[in-house]
Amino acid sequence: MLILTLDPISMNHVADTETAPFVIDGDGPHALKIYFENELNRAKYIDMPLQSAVGMRSLNSDNLQDPLPSTAIN
């Protein structure tokens, strides 16, 4: 399991991991345990919408686009 002690909302280091709120994303050796400074930051993180690799649009056949337009190299 990977452990992150940098609160992704406040960007502050969480020193007291014994009592700090956290979430675990995934499972097994590739799971990520993320600590937060407080419950409010944890709730904000959980409520954040997920983004796909192709941007803010949802993935469906109507809006799939190449996220990086090709360019010619001369």
Image (cartoon, helix red, strand yellow):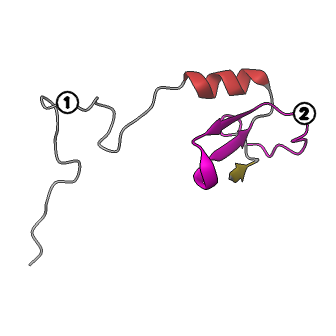
Task: Please identify the quarter of the rendering in which residue 10 is found.
Answer: top right
Residue 36: numbered disc: none
Residue in view at x 61 percent, y 50 percent: 28
Mark 1 Cα shell of 10 Å, populated few (<14), some (14-19), many (≥20): few
Instruction: Verify whether residue 20 appears in magenta.
Output: yes
61 w.r.t. 44: above or below: below
Q: Is residue 29 left or right of residue 17?
A: left
Residue 3 spot, x, y in % from top left: 72, 51
* Amino acid type at mark 2: Thr
Residue 8 spot, x, y in % from top left: 66, 40
Q: Which corner quadrant holds the C terminus? A: bottom left
Residue 6 spot, x, y in % from top left: 73, 46
* Amino acid type at mark 1: Asn
Q: Is residue 36 left or right of residue 25?
A: right
Residue in view at x 16 percent, y 31 percent: 63
Q: Which residue is mark 1?
A: 60
Residue in view at x 22 percent, y 53 percent: 68
Q: Is residue 59 left or right of residue 37?
A: left
Instruction: Verify whether residue 60 appears in magenta.
Output: no
Residue that sits furthest to the front in the current view = 28
Q: How many marks?
A: 2
1 w.r.t. 16: above or below: below
Q: Which residue is mark 2?
A: 19
Q: Mark 1: which secondary structure?
A: loop
Nearer-the-camera pick, 68 or 29: 29
What is the span of residues highlighted in magenta in the rendered image? 8-35
Nearer-the-camera pick, 10 or 63: 63
Q: Mark 2: which secondary structure?
A: loop
Residue in view at x 86 percent, y 42 percent: 17
Task: Please identify the quarter of the rendering in which residue 23 is found.
Answer: top right
How far apart, in angstroms, are the residues tagged by discs 2 and 1? 42 Å
